[in-house]
Image (cartoon, rainbow, N blue to C red):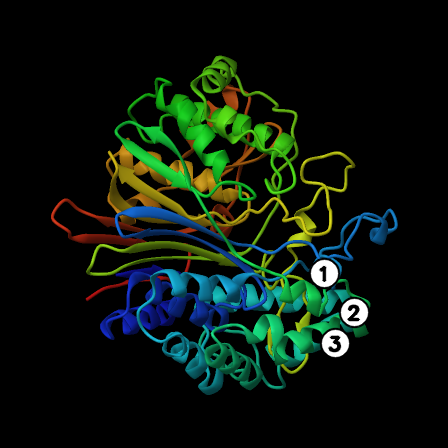
Amino acid sequence: MVATSQPLAAQAGLFVLREGGTAADAAIATAAALTVLEPTSNGIGGDNFALLWHGGELLGLNASGAAPARLTLDALNGQPMPRHGWTPVTIPGAVRGWADLHARAGRLPFARLLEPAIHYARQGYPLSPEVARHWARAAQIYGAVASPQFSEWFKVFMPPGFIPAPGAVWASEAHARTLELMAASGGEDFYTGQTAQRIHDAGQAAGGHLSGDDLAGHASEWVRPISARYGDHEIWELPPNGQGVVALIALGVLDKLELPPGRDDPASLHRQIEAVKLAFADAHRSLGDPRQVEVPVEQWLSEAHQNELRSLIGSSARDPQTDSPGSGGTVYLATADGQGNMVSFIQSNYMGFGSGVVVPGTGVALHNRGHNFSLQAGHPNVLAPGKRPYHTIIPGFLTRQGRPVGPFGVMGGFMQPQGHVQVVLNTLRSGLNPQAALDAPRWQWLGGQRVEVEPELGGEVRSALSARGHQVSVQPERASFGRGQIIWRGEHGVLMGGSESRADGQVAAF
């Protein structure tokens, strides 16, 4: 089974499974295809993370990149970190992540896995509705800036005569050629070959900080996943620099906090929102790259700390006195094969197409993860060369008493841990099937006492939350509430999947 946000990408993963590939093979094929089929949210020039159930254990892969050696606080000259251009570009880890996942758990040749992506890049494909909508929005944003730094983006993603609308056909020969170089080299070309040289040359010509030496020195990291209990299940996330620990803190607090039985009971929603606020406050205060700073994950997940947080949740909304969450753009996918292997995989360029920089001749759009660094001296997440930023994208995984249940995720910037909390509660408290757990109306904490809700969360619920001090607003833009995928494996090995109704996705199985 494959579940992801774009139907043709789901079919790419299913193709690989039919060929005898593993869940890891299917994840790589789907992820590579998504760089072509949903470039509005991810690309070859981004990062990815994975949770892999393989050989009877859960493994974690951190394939995020660090700040270039020349990207320092002094290099910013006291200016804020820009959203676009070369400055916020950190080392892209996505392609190395594909290669490392394949080396660990793949079966088919690596080049075979990239064939669907190459086909769609070269032959073209029709845009699905949500992809078209976000594509048009990006064109409007970049066009309003009218900067030469976006010229290559318009050349690749807005060629003459192309209008991003549902059914419009787009292709990129440059993207296809780059994927062929990745296929032939096992991904190495991106870091030490022709593609790396083109990235280096373009960056140097534009006064950017990313260099060929930065690319050549990049490596992924296999890490030990972290977990929290909810009832008789365990929820798993990757450790920092990702924000998965936010979901675990909140779920740990909620596990022993009395919640009314109704899914949309205002008293229950109030406590969920308050738990999420407190969890974000911890992360915003102390989360950074554990290779360079101490991140108190064990303390955050301890019973003593969670008891302390529970005691702070009263009957009224609190202002947690922490930074407001931001925005992002991401793709998530889940895969499962017939041998019991499963993958939870997430990939992103951040803020839609990322930095807006496209490397000439490659079709590669570079991400802007550097924008998520703090510029406050002494902060654990402060910008520093070789340091990975606080990262928003997080894959999730569910087990029950040590046995795998399956992968899940909700993409969407700082909505992601909030989405994880809501999907887990929908599943374990409300007993919803995967599709219903994803379809249920969502809320999102925005900062302070501000909360957005989907229109389907009715007026009585909104009024009750307002009476508790929450500043509630209705947000009809459903994409802002994240877009998720789920695959659960039942007791008899039967797979159950759900794909986000807020996206164009599909569950594909055979």
In the rendered image, the quadrant that contains the N terminus is bottom left
Q: Is residue 55 above or below residue 360?
A: above
Instruction: Specify whether 495 is left or right of 85.
Output: left
Q: Position of residue 323 (x, y in %)?
A: 66, 34
Q: What is the C-alpha distance between the residues marked 1 and 2? A: 10 Å
Residue 504 in view of the camera: no
Element at label 3:
helix
Q: Position of residue 70 (x, y in %)?
A: 78, 57
Which numbered disc covers residue 396? none
Element at label 2:
loop
Which numbered disc covers residue 147? 2
In the rendered image, the quadrant that contains the C terminus is bottom left
* Closer to viewer: mark 2 or mark 3: 3
Q: What is the C-alpha distance between the residues marked 2 and 3? A: 20 Å
In primary-sequence order, the first of circles 1 and 2 is 1
Give the labeled residue for mark 1: 84
Give the labeled residue for mark 3: 201
Q: Residue at x 57, y 78 (%)?
A: 163
Report crowding for label 1: few under 14, some 14 to 19, many 20 or more residues within 10 A (C-alpha). Answer: many
Q: Is residue 463 above or below residue 382?
A: above
